[in-house]
Image (tube, rainbow, N blue to C red):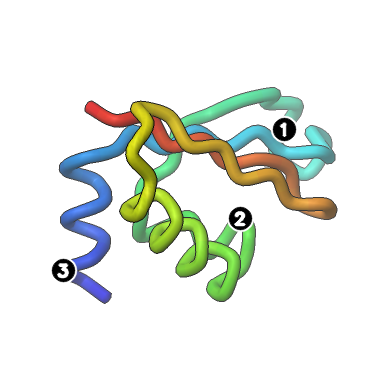
Amino acid sequence: MKNITKLINKNFRIIFQPNDRDRFNGRRRFGVGAGQLHKYIGEHNANTSFEKALEGTDDRFVRRLRKEGSVTFYCK
């Protein structure tokens, strides 16, 4: 897992946009690291998002989740 997070952080900028802003002190949109993303969206969703972002060919990948919100991966 450590090597994957290092690879993700090196190649992508991760932005989390929660559905429920009150849980995150009213923040609408903020950056997170690959190692901490599982705290916001769950471990299974984070691992699936990493795989999809690495498979993608575009410079941006958006993953929308029903309960948590959306995660955007921007290529550096």
Q: Which residue is mark 2?
A: 40
Q: Amino acid at mark 1?
A: Asn
Q: Identify the residue shown where x is 83% and y is 54%.
A: 67
Decide which of 63, 58 is in the foreground and name it. Answer: 58
Distance between the alpha carbons at the discs numbered 3 and 1: 31 Å
Q: Which residue is mark 1?
A: 25
Q: Identify the residue shown where x is 36% and y is 47%.
A: 33
Taking the image as shown, residue 69 lies to the left or right of residue 40, namely: right
Q: Secondary structure at mark 1?
A: loop
Mark 1 or mark 2, earlier in chain:
1
**Picture quadrant of residue 76:** top left
Quarter of the image containing the N terminus? bottom left
Query: How many circles with numbers are drawn on the protein?
Result: 3
Decide which of 11, 39 is in the foreground and name it. Answer: 11
The mark closer to the camera, 3 or 2, is: 3
Q: Residues within 10 Å of mark 3 (few under 14, many from 20)?
A: few
Q: Is residue 15 above or below residue 42?
A: above
Q: Amino acid at mark 2?
A: Tyr
The image position of residue 27, as x and y in percent, is 67, 26
Mark 3 or mark 2, earlier in chain:
3
Q: Amino acid at mark 3?
A: Asn
Q: Residues within 10 Å of mark 2 (few under 14, many from 20)?
A: some
Q: Identify the residue shown where x is 49% and y is 33%.
A: 15
Q: Which residue is mark 3?
A: 3
Q: Is residue 39 above or below residue 10?
A: below
- Contact (CB < 8 A) between labels 3 and 2? no
The mark closer to the camera, 1 or 2, is: 2
Q: Secondary structure at mark 3?
A: helix
Q: Identify the residue shown where x is 43% and y is 37%.
A: 73
The image position of residue 47, as x and y in percent, is 46, 68
Decide which of 28, 23 is in the foreground and name it. Answer: 28
